[in-house]
Amino acid sequence: MFEWIQTFLVVYETQNFSIAAERLFISQPTVSSQIKKLEDRLEIQLFLRNGKQKITATKEADFLYPKFLAVMNELFTSVAQAAKKDNFKENCVIACSHTTAIYLLPKVMKSLVETFPLIDFSINMMNSNEVALAVQAGHADIGLLEKPLATNDIRKEIILEDQLVLAGDAEAAHWLIREEDSGIRFFNELYLNEFDLHPQIIYVNNNELLLQLIREGVGKSIVSSLSITEDMKWQPLGNFLQKRDIFIVAGHSSTNSLLPDVYDWLKQKLKTFFHEKEIKQRKGENNEIFD
């Protein structure tokens, strides 16, 4: 019926079977046959035959022409769009704790978007508890966090160990603490409780602000070694609380067909990055791995 409608449109526009046959690169009898089949299917007459060549469109044909034309245009447009892969892009939301958002994900993001060109990525930075909740609720597809959480309803794997250090002047009176549910706050509180310390507290709800305060000589805090810069004082923590695990998590209900591949790629790439980084550090090299 597709061919019949296409033939009808050309016949209607030319008002001539012979010219329509030339434009469609088919024989005139074929044109006549297709119009007859369409008329039989619709049970209406589309053209009045006035001799072998002369025809006149009926009122029914006048009514159907713009309808059929719109349908065919929409069909051709849809086929053209289907040929463009960009129209089938999927979305992937990555929720990251402050440390993983600033110091981990950017190292591999360029390679990630090049590897998965048919995915539009969104990155949301929040604390570790919020990352887990976002993944559980389906608001994020993948999460990166560093706080150990009881998350039985989502997939969770350790991707690397992060070294913790005490940043700032060891004699500083104030201890800088992140907000509730922050991963790094969890480890600061563990440390303070273990050694029964009761310093003056300054609460800071942003990791970069906390680090800048330390650079300006305001207080001290346990932070990731990834965040230490040359202008910051720091010292190791000793045998207690030297390292923490960093996790990658994902939900089970995402409709993104490429999510398992993204999850596995990200997990492996981050593991590889830090393995190679440790080797280079041991060799005294400081060049970046992912340029």
Image (spheres, rainbow, N blue to C red):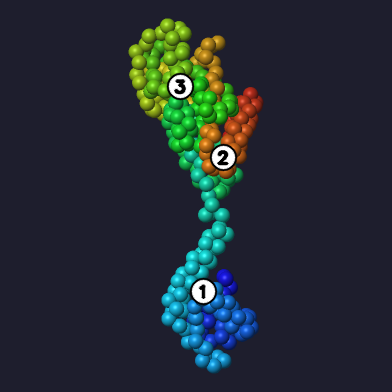
Disc 1 residue type (three-letter)? Leu
95 or 80: nearer the eye? Answer: 80
Q: Check disc 1 and report the residue beneath it.
A: 42
Q: Which mark is residue 257?
A: none
Q: Which mark is residue 259?
A: 2
Q: CA distance from mark 3 to mark 1?
A: 72 Å
Percent x, y of residue 291: 58, 40
Instruction: Judge whether residue 213 can be spotted in this image.
Output: no
Quick one: SS at disc 1? helix
Badge 3: few (under 14), some or many (20 or more) residues near its Cα, within 10 Å? many
Disc 3 residue type (three-letter)? Ile
Q: Earlier in the sequence, mark 3 or mark 2?
A: 3
130 or 270: nearer the eye? Answer: 130
Q: In the shown orientation, is residue 168 left or right of residue 256?
A: left
Quick one: SS at disc 2? helix
Quarter of the image with the N terminus in it: bottom right
> Looking at the image, is 101 positioned above or below residue 181?
below
> Looking at the image, is 255 positioned above or below residue 151?
below
Q: Check disc 3 and report the residue beneath it.
A: 184
Instruction: Judge whether residue 219 can be spotted in this image.
Output: yes
Residue drawn at 57 percent across, 92 percent down = 52
**Contact flag, marks 3 and 2 (Cβ < 8 Å):** no
Q: Earlier in the sequence, mark 3 or mark 1?
A: 1
